[in-house]
Image (cartoon, coloured by chain):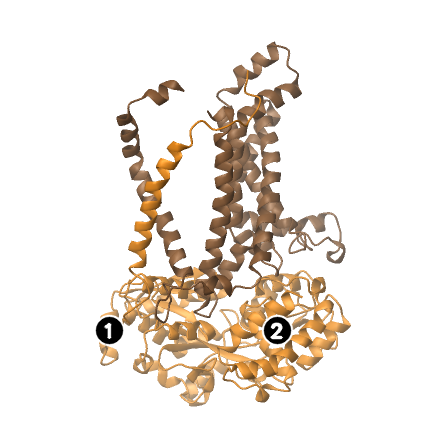
Amino acid sequence: MTAVQSRPRRHGMRATLLVLPAIIPVAIVVIGGIGTTVVQSLGLMPLVGTPALSVDAFESTDNLLGSALLSLGIAVVSTAIAAVVGFFTAVLIISGNWGGRIVGALSAAAVTVPHLVGAASVGLLLSDSGVLARILGIPPESWPALVAGPTWFAVIAEYAWKESAFVALIIVGTLATRITSYDETAAMLGASRGARLRLVLFPLAAPSLLVASAIAFAYTLGSYEVAWLLGKTYPEPLSVMALRLFNSASLTARPEAAAVAVITLLLTAAIVGVAMLGLRRMRAWQ
Amino acid sequence: MQIWLPFRRAASPTTARRRILPALATAAVTALALSACSAPTNTPSGPEFFDWADVQIAADGQTVKLWMWGGDDQGNAYVDDVLAPAAAAQGVTLERVPIADTKDALNRVFTELQAGRNTDGAVDLVWINGDNFRTGKQADAWFCEWTDLLPNMTLVSDSDPLLTEDFGTPVDGCEAPWHKAQFSFVYNEATVPNPPTTIEGILDWAEDNPGRFTYPAAPDFTGSAFLREVLYSVSGGYENVPSVYSDDAFAELSPALYERLDQLAPSLWREGTTYPATSEQLTKLFADGEIDMMMTYGPATLTALVENGTLPDTTRVLTVDDGTLGNASFFGIPSNSGNIAGAMVVANEALSVEQQVAKADPAVWGQFTVLDLDALSADDRALFDALPQSPVVPTFDILSQNANPELSAEWVPALDDGWRTTIAAR
């Protein structure tokens, strides 16, 4: 720790210069995209007519609060499930036995599946006359409304499944190199399995668990295709609303779409900001 | 091992603050730089051609990217295997760009125009109609007054209202016709032995058979058309709905529509708590036997779906006495296309008798022709008469009896939004 702080400042400059080729394109795309969205949402980039600063787009969108709460609800629940499942999956993978290897391979495979394909698969599996209903021999009318139902079950299941694999792999990546010595030392000193999980594995995994969950949360809040394919018609999550407005035939809807996107962005930034603050307070991160 | 508490106070937050300032500055500068190229200020008019030979010379060697909805395998195969070779014979390479929604193409053009990319856009030709066409026209995104140059436009009637106006928006030579479509209700003969014969009858039938009927959620193209069908029905016929949109007409006529749909909702699939998001999802419900009646604006595809087993053999198109909506779809050329001449050659080729006959064959695509059959030569007419009949879809003459004209495009978003706030939110 002290060695890092006493390094000459020059060193930091060189590191910054080395990452610039990566940062500049990202900055142009991300900041440029966000900048354009903000400018559009404020009515400064209309498709027709003269640009004029206004917040009409933020006010004229219906049921914004309902959509925001729904988006947050889906993201919180699916991220929480993904975090818990992902953590225990990682523990299983790290255990190194053959079951762990199979789970590891399955998780790696799940991460490569695009969300759109995942959503289509979950839809085919869980819908009223889907594969599962047919295998179990349950007629569509008595099958619960998992897809497009009031509980958003299929949407949450898809996100939780995909993101838990992502969370697990991130945790495995950070733990794999250093867990064995800590874990064995604790075992030598007489720590039980439960105590090792609570006192060794979890604290070491916590920073990457938090970072992976924050990424999963931000993704879930921002992505639209899963909720659009598997969700209910009304109310709609923010991302679905933004896309519907953006694709709307009326030219005035574009600023409204941008406004919804800006609100989604602020929500995401707030949650990720809180997560990053939490990360700084973690011992294992220092 | 003092690391069991995951949280503790951070050491030094000041370094973070020092890093945020330059980031904010960069953000501000980038946003400013981007906003400098705001709304489209100039309207690119495109090249000028004096006659068709002029166009052909300019088109030679051009590659035309046709952006079209990619969800119809037959349509994709027709363009790739029939239309593209014919275009290639005239020196134009035709590349199909499949899109999930026609609005994607329109949005691409808008974004390019916003960014000042005025002469070499990524979209050369779009399969389009209705509100998308109107929106593009409002934003001056189309190349116009080019269809008169096409030699094959002489085969098209210049007084056919379906082709001179597109959902009430004058075509003005900004798009060339491609095919006609007729909104159709589809039922399963095995489960609906005595199908209703009017729109109101269909709604009554749905109420008598709870859970066996639904429609796609607006703004889906098909769901949106269904709203207009019901609007005509509850208004006592299309004659009573002014084609031109006005807030007064909407306020007067739309309550009856929403009242009827609200009354219908509890009898729909899933008690109307949710609706299929797309017409494909509606078709899937019908294919799975969850509903007994559905609707489509593209009856052309039904024959193939029955033949390949997706839909039951007992699938039939329902003709209703009050008639259904008819429309035509077109080829539009964005004003910022770099291959306008090539796009014109493709649009002209698509209007030829050979292409229209091939496209009308149910085994190829089954799309209804836009050509004026009465004005064709006897030989050409015979080609159309010799087309095989579909066991599922009646001929266009029967299907388009009492055809209802489409409302002007302004009606569409108004009805869709109203549906969303009153019916979807109920």
User: What is the crowding at mark 1: few (fewer than 14 residues within 10 Å), some, or many (at least 20)?
Assistant: some
The image quarter containing residue B337 is bottom left
Q: Which chain is orange?
A: B
Is B118 left or right of A139, judged from the image as shown? left
Check disc 2 and report its element: helix, strand or loop: loop
The image quarter containing residue B394 is bottom right
Q: Could you say which disc has been placed on residue B392 in the image?
A: 2
The CA span between labels 2 and 1 is 45 Å
Image point (55%, 26%), residue name: B6
Residue B269 screen position, x and y as percent: 70, 64
Image point (53%, 24%), residue name: A204
- Which mark is nearer the camera, 2 or 1? 1
Is B41 left or right of A208, judged from the image as shown? left
Q: Is residue A75 visible?
A: yes
The front one of A210 and A93 is: A210
Q: Which chain is brown?
A: A
Q: Could you say which disc has been placed on residue B29 in the image?
A: none
Image point (65%, 85%), residue name: B321
Residue B293 screen position, x and y as percent: 67, 70
